[in-house]
Each structure stands twice: as C-alpha cells, then as structure tokens.
Image: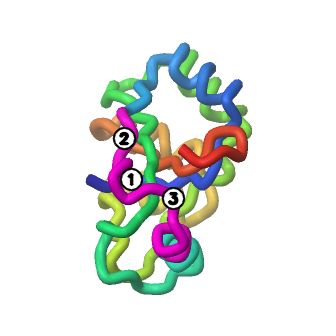
Amino acid sequence: MSGHYLLTNIPQTELNMATFKGAAWSARMHANVGWTQTSRQALSSVLANVAIPNRNQLPPHCYLTFAGQNPAPMALKNYLKVASWVDSLRRPTGAGFGLTALNAIAGGLFGNGHFADSLIAQIEHGGVSVEIYYVSGYEV
C-alpha cells in the first residue's frame, strides 16, 4: 500500500484534531521491518528523490486517511486550510517508492504549491491517504 501524499512528521495535537474532523489512523505498517539503519536509509533515499528497489525496506509508518466526500464538509475544508502539517506534504518521485496517483485537479494544485486545495480536491474525488513516519518527532 502507498499513500497519496507523504508526511514525514505530524504533531500529536494535529493528529488528534484530524481524527476529530473525521480522519482515520491506520494500524502500523512495516512493523516487521522496524527502524533499522537499512530502513532509515530507504526513507532518506525516498526523501531525496533517490530510487529505491521497492517499498519493502521502508520503516514502520501509518496512514492518515480521509474518506471521499463530495463536497467535503466545510468544517474539514476550514481545518485543512489552517492545519500546520498540510504545508509539509510531499510527493517524492524517486523510482521504487510509488505513491498513489492523484486525480488531475489535485495533481495540478499540488504542483502549484496549493497543498490544502490539493488535499481537498483529492478528498472530493475519492478517498485520500497520507503516509506518515513520525508523530511529534517520534518514530511510528
């Protein structure tokens, strides 16, 4: 599984608020891999847009998921436009990482630096998942 977006770190308070606004927090993925020198290097490579062989050696992470809703509720839109973590969303392009594709509108908005609008457009297209590796600076 891969996310639509990657978020290196989310503050616990923002994670709590996102779930209060209707997002779901997944079970821990890649727990069997653990946080090792190899898995940390794989994540570092992804963040530097360097190709990795596949996702198998990525460290543990969770997904913050938002169900598709069209239109997205105004309270959710308002939250996403001010949430501190939204401007830190990334879409690394190195081979082997393979994020889930965005719809055309969300992709265009993201490419132009409109991260909250991209997230909202993707929610309004279907569901969206954000792949997260750290919560308040701690490894997931």
> Is residue 66 toward the left or the right of residue 46 in the image?
left
* Badge 1: residue crowd in 10 Å (few <14, some 14–19, many ≥20): many
Q: Can residue 92 be seen in this view?
A: no
Q: Does the magenta stretch include residue 51?
A: no
Name the residue carrying label 3.
35
Name the residue carrying label 2.
128
Task: Check disc 3 and report its element: helix, strand or loop.
Answer: loop
Magenta-highlighted residues: 27-41
Q: Is 47 located above or below residue 118 in the figure?
A: below
Q: How many marks?
A: 3
Gap in Å between the C-alphas at discs 3 and 1? 22 Å
* Badge 3: residue crowd in 10 Å (few <14, some 14–19, many ≥20): some
Q: Position of residue 62 (x, y in %)?
A: 43, 42
Q: Which residue is drawn at 72% across and 32% down?
A: 82
Name the residue carrying label 1.
4
Q: Where is residue 139 in the image (x, y as percent from the top left)?
A: 60, 48
Which color mode does the image show?
rainbow
Marks 2 and 3 in Cβ contact (< 8 Å): no
Q: Residue at x 45, y 18 (%)?
A: 22
Marks 1 and 2 in Cβ contact (< 8 Å): yes
Q: What residue type is labelled 3?
A: Trp
Q: Position of residue 51 (x, y in %)?
A: 41, 85
Given residues 49 and 135, the one toward you in this image is 135
Which of pointers 1 and 2 lies earlier in the amino acid sequence? 1
Gap in Å between the C-alphas at discs 1 and 2? 6 Å
Q: Is 119 located above or below residue 7 in the figure?
A: above
Q: Which amino acid does label 1 sit on?
A: His
Given residues 1 and 120, the one toward you in this image is 1
